[in-house]
Image (cartoon, rainbow, N blue to C red):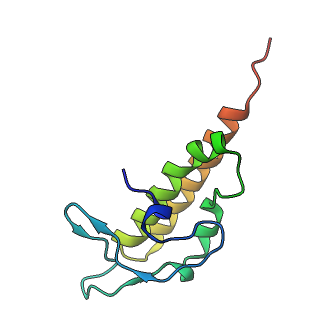
Amino acid sequence: MRYADDIGIVVGELNYEYLYLPMESGEFMADEEKTPVDYSKEQILQFFDYSHLKPELRDVSRPFCDLAYHVVGTLPRNAERTVALRKILEAKDAAVRAYLSVPVS
């Protein structure tokens, strides 16, 4: 699995560039014209930052960040993509809470 920070996206510092993110099947592209994706214009991505978290929580959050970048890089910008990103964010938050939860006795 490739991680966003492995391919030049500086998670946490919001130091994004126009990037093509290579995949096995080709490249991530947001539209048919094959224009680069400007991740800095995607405000919701800031909430997937995990650089400030403890290492064990980074492991919980990282897959959700990767999925969010994949969604932005492969799907056209529209209402349904926004819904997908919000649900991924909700899932990430729930996963972190699940990790942090204390068993009730």
The extreme right residue here reads 105
Residue 48 place in picture, x, y as percent: 60, 60
Camera sees residue 84: no
Question: Residue shown at 59%/78% (left/top)?
Answer: 15
Question: Residue shown at 49%/49% (left/top)?
Answer: 63
* Relative vertical location of residue 77 with respect to residue 102 in this rendering, above or below: below
Question: Residue shown at 36%/84% (left/top)?
Answer: 36
Residue 84 place in picture, x, y as percent: 47, 59
* Relative vertical location of residue 10 with respect to residue 99 in this rendering, above or below: below
Locate residue 75 relative to residue 32 in the image: left or right.
Answer: right
Camera sees residue 13: yes
Q: Nearer the viewer, residue 5 or 104?
A: 5
The extreme top residue here reads 105
Residue 11 place in picture, x, y as percent: 59, 66
Tell me how many marks there are: 0
Q: Nearer the viewer, residue 19 or 76?
A: 19
For the C terminus, the quadrant is: top right
Locate residue 54 relative to residue 36 in the image: left or right.
Answer: right
**Residue 49 position by quadrant:** bottom right
Residue 2 place in picture, x, y as percent: 38, 56
* Relative vertical location of residue 102 with respect to residue 84 in this rendering, above or below: above
Question: Residue shown at 54%/51% (left/top)?
Answer: 62
The extreme left residue here reads 25
